[in-house]
Amino acid sequence: MLEAEDQSVSEPGVSPDVQCSGLPGRVVPVIDRNRCEGKSACVEVCPYHVFELRMLALHERAGLSPLGKLKAWFHGGRQAFAVRSQDCHACGRCVAACPEQAIRLAPAPAVP
Ligand code: SF4
Protein backbone atom coordinates (compact mmCIF):
# COMPACT_ATOMS: atom_id res chain seq x y z
CA MET A 1 0.00 0.00 0.00
CA LEU A 2 1.30 3.46 -0.89
CA GLU A 3 1.97 6.00 1.85
CA ALA A 4 0.38 9.44 1.58
CA GLU A 5 2.78 11.89 -0.04
CA ASP A 6 4.77 13.89 2.48
CA GLN A 7 3.68 17.55 2.11
CA SER A 8 6.09 18.91 4.69
CA VAL A 9 8.66 21.59 3.99
CA SER A 10 12.07 20.08 3.34
CA GLU A 11 14.36 23.08 3.52
CA PRO A 12 17.54 22.64 5.55
CA GLY A 13 17.10 23.50 9.20
CA VAL A 14 13.32 23.60 9.01
CA SER A 15 11.23 21.47 11.31
CA PRO A 16 9.91 18.52 9.26
CA ASP A 17 6.33 18.79 10.49
CA VAL A 18 5.80 22.21 8.98
CA GLN A 19 3.16 22.56 6.30
CA CYS A 20 3.33 26.24 5.46
CA SER A 21 2.58 27.23 1.89
CA GLY A 22 3.55 30.87 2.30
CA LEU A 23 6.53 32.13 0.35
CA PRO A 24 9.34 34.00 2.11
CA GLY A 25 9.81 37.70 1.54
CA ARG A 26 6.16 38.79 1.43
CA VAL A 27 5.69 39.70 5.08
CA VAL A 28 7.90 40.30 8.09
CA PRO A 29 7.11 39.99 11.78
CA VAL A 30 7.00 43.31 13.62
CA ILE A 31 7.51 43.26 17.38
CA ASP A 32 5.94 45.87 19.63
CA ARG A 33 8.84 46.83 21.91
CA ASN A 34 6.45 48.06 24.59
CA ARG A 35 4.70 44.68 24.75
CA CYS A 36 7.47 42.10 24.32
CA GLU A 37 8.49 40.48 27.61
CA GLY A 38 11.07 38.11 26.17
CA LYS A 39 9.15 34.95 27.00
CA SER A 40 10.53 33.31 23.83
CA ALA A 41 7.31 31.68 22.60
CA CYS A 42 8.10 33.03 19.12
CA VAL A 43 11.60 31.56 19.26
CA GLU A 44 10.14 28.18 20.13
CA VAL A 45 7.33 28.03 17.57
CA CYS A 46 8.91 29.59 14.48
CA PRO A 47 9.87 26.76 12.12
CA TYR A 48 12.22 29.07 10.19
CA HIS A 49 14.25 30.30 13.16
CA VAL A 50 13.41 33.93 12.50
CA PHE A 51 13.69 35.08 16.14
CA GLU A 52 16.43 35.41 18.71
CA LEU A 53 16.40 36.84 22.22
CA ARG A 54 18.92 39.46 23.26
CA MET A 55 19.34 42.36 25.63
CA LEU A 56 17.86 45.66 24.61
CA ALA A 57 20.48 48.23 23.64
CA LEU A 58 20.49 51.54 25.49
CA HIS A 59 18.97 53.41 22.57
CA GLU A 60 16.23 50.78 22.32
CA ARG A 61 15.42 51.12 26.02
CA ALA A 62 15.32 54.89 25.61
CA GLY A 63 12.58 54.55 23.01
CA LEU A 64 10.23 52.61 25.29
CA SER A 65 7.18 54.07 26.94
CA PRO A 66 7.28 54.42 30.76
CA LEU A 67 5.33 51.17 31.08
CA GLY A 68 7.60 49.50 28.52
CA LYS A 69 10.66 50.55 30.53
CA LEU A 70 9.12 49.13 33.69
CA LYS A 71 8.35 45.84 31.93
CA ALA A 72 11.86 45.68 30.46
CA TRP A 73 13.37 46.23 33.89
CA PHE A 74 11.12 43.59 35.43
CA HIS A 75 11.97 40.99 32.75
CA GLY A 76 15.71 41.63 32.72
CA GLY A 77 15.82 43.70 29.55
CA ARG A 78 15.64 40.72 27.18
CA GLN A 79 13.37 40.85 24.17
CA ALA A 80 12.79 38.98 20.93
CA PHE A 81 14.20 40.27 17.66
CA ALA A 82 13.33 39.12 14.15
CA VAL A 83 16.93 38.67 13.07
CA ARG A 84 16.05 36.58 10.01
CA SER A 85 12.80 38.28 9.02
CA GLN A 86 13.55 37.59 5.35
CA ASP A 87 12.93 33.90 6.08
CA CYS A 88 9.37 34.46 7.35
CA HIS A 89 6.86 32.27 5.49
CA ALA A 90 3.76 33.92 7.02
CA CYS A 91 2.53 30.86 8.89
CA GLY A 92 1.30 33.04 11.76
CA ARG A 93 2.50 30.74 14.54
CA CYS A 94 4.43 33.49 16.31
CA VAL A 95 1.41 35.82 16.25
CA ALA A 96 -0.78 33.14 17.81
CA ALA A 97 1.84 32.02 20.34
CA CYS A 98 2.92 35.38 21.75
CA PRO A 99 1.34 35.71 25.22
CA GLU A 100 1.70 39.50 25.06
CA GLN A 101 0.18 39.89 21.60
CA ALA A 102 3.35 41.75 20.67
CA ILE A 103 3.78 40.41 17.13
CA ARG A 104 2.02 41.30 13.92
CA LEU A 105 2.87 40.52 10.33
CA ALA A 106 3.40 43.45 8.00
CA PRO A 107 4.21 43.68 4.30
CA ALA A 108 7.91 43.25 3.72
CA PRO A 109 9.72 46.46 2.80
CA ALA A 110 10.36 46.83 -0.89
CA VAL A 111 13.91 46.01 -1.96
CA PRO A 112 15.39 48.94 -3.92
S1 SF4 B 1 4.84 33.95 10.74
FE1 SF4 B 1 6.13 33.95 12.57
S2 SF4 B 1 6.39 31.77 13.11
FE2 SF4 B 1 5.69 31.84 10.95
S3 SF4 B 1 7.57 31.87 9.72
FE3 SF4 B 1 6.99 34.02 10.04
S4 SF4 B 1 8.17 34.62 11.86
FE4 SF4 B 1 8.17 32.37 11.83
Image (cartoon, helix red, strand yellow):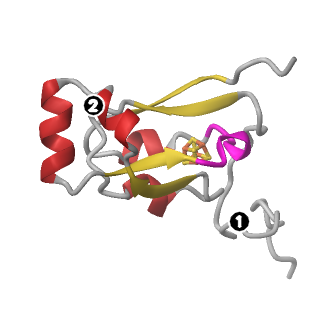
Residue 30 magenta-highlighted: no
Indicate left or right for 70 with 19 as reference. Answer: left
Q: Position of residue 55 (x, y in %)?
A: 37, 54
Q: Quadrant of residue 49?
A: bottom right
Q: Quadrant of residue 68?
A: top left
Q: Amino acid at mark 1?
A: Val
Q: Quadrant of residue 46?
A: bottom right
Indicate left or right for 69 with 105 as reference. Answer: left
Residue for point 65% across, 59% down: 18
User: Which quarter of the rendering shows the C terminus?
Assistant: top right
Q: Secondary structure at mark 2?
A: loop
Q: Amino acid at mark 2?
A: Asn
Residue 88 magenta-highlighted: yes
Residue for point 46% across, 63% down: 44
User: In the drawing, what numbered circle is on residue 34?
Assistant: 2
Between 85 and 68, the one lying in front of the other is 68
Q: Secondary structure at mark 1?
A: loop
Residue for point 72% across, 46% down: 87
Name the residue carrying label 1: 14
Chief secondary structure of the magenta span? loop
Q: Position of residue 37 (x, y in %)?
A: 26, 47
Identify the magenta region: 83-90
Q: Residues within 10 Å of mark 2 (few under 14, many from 20)?
A: some
Between 43 and 76, the one lying in front of the other is 76
